Every structure is written in C-alpha cells, then in structure tokens.
C-alpha cells in the first residue's frame, strides 16, 4: 500500500496497543520497550521516534500519587510499622511503574508520527 492508502490513525488506538502508527498492523516494539528499526508490515522507518524520558516521567507522575497516598494511609491511619508499609508499597510502586511503561511509550511514539513532530531547529535566515 502507498501512503495514500493508509488513513491517519489516532495515537490512542495504535500507541497503547504497540501497533505501527502508519498502517496500524505491525508492531513497533522489538522487546519490552525497545523500538524496532522499521515496521514489518508497511516498512515505516521508526528512526523518527524519540520518546526520551517522556514515558518514565508520565509513569512516575501517575504512579506516585496513589502509591504515596497508600503509604501515608498505612502509616498515619492504620499505624502500620515502617517496614510493613515499605514491604507493601514497594511492589505496588514497581507494578504501577512497569505495567504502563510500554503503552505510554507506544502512545508517545504514535503521537510523534501523527503530529509530524520533529527535532527543533534554529532558523538562521532572520
């Protein structure tokens, strides 16, 4: 298929599923969060994708609030010992940070493609 035959796909449908933002069929991931060089189906070059620390930032931002709330509740309301709070909180933190990492990275990569995001450049003409 040519570029004309692929309709624009919204990042919220392709990204979290780890699908190619161009064709919506091939996978963009080689491993857990390692990106492929190109889509196996349509051949889209994925070298444009640079999510950098974005996925980790969003995951930490989202995960820290409920886990911190749980830890404070355990310590202040229930009166649990610090070691028990840590024992229960650390697995929650790992779970809430690892599971959403791949879908969020896929969403950011798909958003970069959908919105044609590029590296910033200085305009030397002015």
Image (spheres, rainbow, N blue to C red):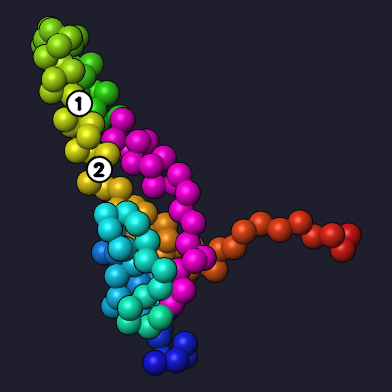
Give the residue drawn at x 47%, y 87%. 3
| Residue occupied by mark 1 | 90
Give the residue drawn at x 22%, y 34%. 94
Front-most of residues 13 and 101: 101
Q: Is residue 86 left or right of residue 13?
A: left
Q: Earlier in the sequence, mark 2 or mark 1?
A: 1
The picture places residue 96, in percent across and down from the top left corner, at 23, 38
Please state, as top left, top right, bottom left or bottom right, where the N terminus lies in the image: bottom left
Evaluate whether residue 29 shows in this view: yes
The picture places residue 45, in percent across and down from the top left corner, at 46, 74
Front-most of residues 72 and 124: 124
Q: Say above or below: 14 vs 61.
A: below
Please state, as top left, top right, bottom left or bottom right, where the C terminus lies in the image: bottom right
Tell me the SS state at disc 1. Answer: helix
Which region shows up in magenta?
44-64
Prevailing secondary structure of the magenta residues: helix
Q: Say above or below: 35 vs 60.
A: below
Give the residue drawn at x 66%, y 57%. 120
Give the residue drawn at x 42%, y 61%. 109
Question: Residue 80, located in which quarter of the rendered image?
Answer: top left
Evaluate whether residue 77 shows in this view: no
| Residue occupied by mark 2 | 98
* Pointer 2 with pointer 1, Cβ within 8 A: no
- For label 2, the crowd category at 10 Å Cα-Cα, with few meaning under 14, some 14 to 19 and many 20 or more, is some
The picture places residue 57, in percent across and down from the top left corner, at 41, 40
**Residue 48 is covered by the magenta coloring:** yes
**Residue 116 is covered by the magenta coloring:** no
Tell me the SS state at disc 2. Answer: helix
Q: Say above or below: 54 vs 11.
A: above
């Amino acid at each position: 298929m040519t570029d004309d035959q692929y309709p624009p796909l919204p990042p919220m449908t392709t990204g979290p599923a780890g699908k190619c933002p161009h064709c919506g069929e091939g996978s963009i991931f080689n491993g857990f969060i390692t990106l492929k060089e190109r889509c196996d189906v349509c051949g889209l070059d994925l070298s444009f994708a640079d999510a950098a620390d974005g996925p980790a930032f969003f995951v930490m931002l989202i995960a820290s609030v409920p886990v911190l709330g749980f830890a404070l509740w355990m310590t202040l309301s229930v009166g649990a010992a610090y070691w028990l709070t840590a024992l229960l909180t650390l697995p929650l933190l790992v779970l809430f940070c690892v599971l959403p990492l791949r879908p969020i990275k896929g969403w950011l990569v798909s958003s970069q493609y959908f919105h044609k995001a590029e590296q910033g450049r200085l305009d030397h003409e002015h």
